[in-house]
Image: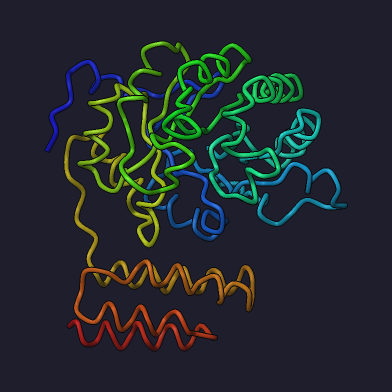
Amino acid sequence: MINLSPDLQEKLITPLKIGSLEVKSRVFQSPLSGVTDLVFRRLVRRYAPHSMLYTEMVNAKEIHHLPQLPKLMAIEDNEHPISIQLFDCRPDFMGSAAEKAVLEGSQTIDINMGCPVNKITKKGGGSSLLRQPEVAEAIVRAVVKAVDVPITVKTRIGWNDQEINILDFAKRMENAGASLITIHGRTREQGYHGVARWEWIKKVKEILTIPVIANGDIFSIESALKCLEITGADGVMCSRGTLGNPFLVGEIDYFLKTGNMPDQVTIKQRLECAKEHLQGLWEYKGKKGIFQARKHLTWYCKDFNGAAYLREQLSLINTVEEGFNLIDQTLENLD
């Protein structure tokens, strides 16, 4: 287990100021497209009552043209602190979308400047903004002007190894009015391959006055501690580590606050959570929810005898009953 320096330990147990907003946890749940819907966030919130949560990223252009807001912007009253993440390359659209997001209950507006997916970058959004810092600045300034809540940015260290420009870019975001920046320690070209280069997050932390949140390769309490020690960041954001593991954010938060390891989640608890996830998606989205649940259910299936078989079968379910029966059969065999 990593031993944090006394100064860093003290910092991590104190509330974090994001502009005018104070949050009581230094561990964030990342926005994840196709994952962090209302049902998933309910599960994360149960184990992480004070952590910042994020919706899936929302297309500002879509909000501008649709007569009503998309369902993925829906926020429950007990979800706070929570932020709606927006993406686009047009400052005016982003400002208008931010106004609507705040009316929905978003306590900060997070701007996606890190998504590496082609369909996003080809339209000038996501990590393509790393190549257009002036546009990125204009977006932040427009959103800051449009709403009274703190504005945050999530980005990467650069477009590729030849264009690692995060130091200049992050400084521009701070100067434009961002209240916090989250940095995924990979380039856009890396996608999710290779290792996150936390040393670049450390360099950013050394030059900014706003909070810096470290993201990338946070899969356990141990990796979170190592990242915090290396980067000196103000907190960590969990992404892929929470797939099939909505307990992770709460586990890290518990350790940072108490210095004690939480009770290990049992296989039975994990699979019961999978059932709850499936039921929730069915109730919230109907048949579409069943199809979406398939990928979630496979992520819960690991590290036990029969996991591969269960994973394969759950990827084919068409009803809640099928999923429950498969999981219950597995639980009986585990006893």
Q: Position of residue 172 (x, y in %)?
A: 57, 15
What x and y, as percent, mark residue 104? 71, 42
Query: Residue 68 versus residue 202: which sits nearer the camera?
Result: 202
- Would you identify the image quadrant in which residue 291 lies? bottom right
312 vs 47: above or below:
below
**For this view, does 55 lie left or right of residue 204?**
right
- 141 left or right, relative to 203: right
Look at the image and tell me in which quarter the N terminus lies.
Answer: top left
Q: On the picture, is 276 further left or further right than 141?
A: left
Q: Residue at x 68, y 38 (%)?
A: 124
Name the foreground residue: 151 vs 106: 151
Give the image's coloring scheme: rainbow
Residue in the image at 72% along x and 34% along y: 89
Residue in view at x 34 percent, y 54 percent: 247
Rendered residue at 86%/48% (across/down) = 65
Residue 173, position as x, y percentages in the image: 57, 19
